[in-house]
Image (cartoon, rainbow, N blue to C red):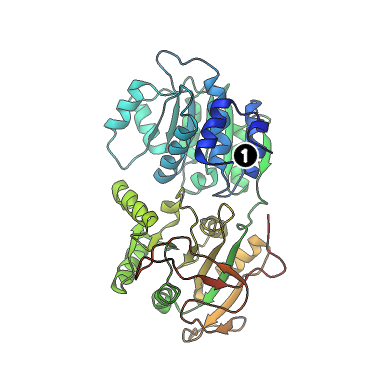
Amino acid sequence: MTFKELGLSEALLKAVADQGYETPSPIQEKAIPKILQGQDVLASAQTGTGKTAGFAMPMIQLLAKEPPRQRRPIRALVLTPTRELASQVLEDVQNYSKYVDLRSTVIFGGVKQNPQVDQLKRGIDILVACPGRLMDLESQGFVDLRQIEFLVLDEADRMLDMGFLRDIKRIIAMMPLKRQNLLFSATFSSDIRKLANGLLTNPVTVEATPENTTADRVDQIVYKVDQARKTELITKLIWDGNWHQVLVFTRTKHGANRLVQKLEKAKITAAAIHGNKSQAARTKALANFKKGEVSVLVATDIAARGLDIPLLPYVINFELPNVPEDYVHRIGRTGRAGAAGIAISLVSVEELEYVRGIEKLLGMPLVQEIIEGFEPTKGPVEGGKKRMHGKGGNTSGGREIRNNNTTNRNNGNTNRNVRQKSRSKGGDNRN
């Protein structure tokens, strides 16, 4: 299947070619024709599957069919849960609409509203927004949603987790009843299905991956360790493996800050992103991480949503989430676009119940090991295979996971390869 066969116009095909894409991803292949037909869509797609292009390209094509109106009322609204995701969606929308006469902008909190208001006053066709700032500007009379033709809820599951349901309902009430609705979610929980039933009209359901599965080509492993020694262990893993571009998840903002301080003391460049950080600080931390100036990015779940980090090789759960679905979201940051990745969870005895919840959700066991010298001092240790973790982070056998960031901490040369055996028993858990 090619993008042309999906029914995209020459303007869209040219924009796609500029981005270097040759063939559509599964979610694009399934969603684009349905959206072009004018249908409401309920889509399940993990991060990194190309879902933004899956809704942005057909939406742009349908909007561009009409000549631009003189005052350019807002005709399409994309709601996202976080600032980072909103910025990324806008970038994609602008890339795909570069050869058509459409204007787009983004609004979110944490920054001054005046530049955003100026953009709105000039007239835009596509608005990407976070719910809070959108409602604020609407109440001030700067946003008018009465001519909306498209509504997209991106990462709807996360918006519900963050308590945006009431805001979403209020925003929907500001729009005309006749419009095309697109709902994208990584998982189909009962709350998502309830929201879809009240929002979508005769929707078609498309799924790029089986529900609640982890990404293909991600090796998953649990290291059992005492809570008090997690920082020591994560420092050893990073130094011995010579790892760069490591995304680490903590449960709390304060935990993220503490871990960054300890990593910096161990001469590992690190930065934190979470809700207490200003938008400027979060943007700078992410940019430095992508450039290789920061080796470790420590994030909370909410702050990490929408992060676009190509070829991210390592995700580490410093603490497991207490919601199993969040584990799926976290490790979906690696193993994207056909690249291999490693997802490591540092698990204390207090978190073993979370492991069982994750295994139940995935329908598969997670391999549990104990690194020599870091044996847990309390709780059961059976089921944990003890192994050495030598210089270079090598284990015997398995496939080679290459670190794609070419920045070396010592001399700027290509990082050492890390060899990791496949962790999934009974198959690869392929989608």
Give the quarter of the image for residue 118.
top left
Which residue is at 44% across, 50% downward? Answer: 307
**Rendered view: 339 above or below 190:** below
- SS category of the residue bearing label 1: helix
Q: How many labels does the image show?
A: 1
Task: Decide which of 318, 220 is in the foreground and name it.
Answer: 220
Can residue 105 be seen in this snapshot? yes
Task: Decide which of 16, 362 is in the foreground and name it.
Answer: 16
Which residue is at 35% across, 68% downward? Answer: 409
Q: Is residue 53 left or right of residue 430?
A: left
Which residue is at 46% across, 16% downward? Answer: 68
**Rendered view: 59 above or below 357:** above
Q: Hey, what amino acid is under mark 1?
A: Gln
Residue position marked by numbered label 1 in the rendering: 28
Q: Residue furthest right?
A: 426
Task: Decide which of 313, 137 is in the foreground and name it.
Answer: 313
Pick the quarter of the image with the C terminus: bottom right
Pick the quarter of the image with the N terminus: top right
Question: Residue 302, position in %: x, y?
Answer: 43, 52
Question: Residue 52, position in %: x, y?
Answer: 53, 40
Give the quarter of the image for residue 212.
bottom right
Can residue 274 be seen in this snapshot? no
User: How would you rate the neighbour count of disc 1 (Cα within 10 Å): few for under 14, some for 14-19, many for 20 or more?
Assistant: many
Question: Residue 343, position in %: x, y?
Answer: 53, 65
Give the quarter of the image for residue 359.
bottom right
**Rendered view: 311 above or below 13:** below
Question: Residue 300, position in %: x, y?
Answer: 42, 58
Q: Which residue lies furthest to the top in this view?
A: 70
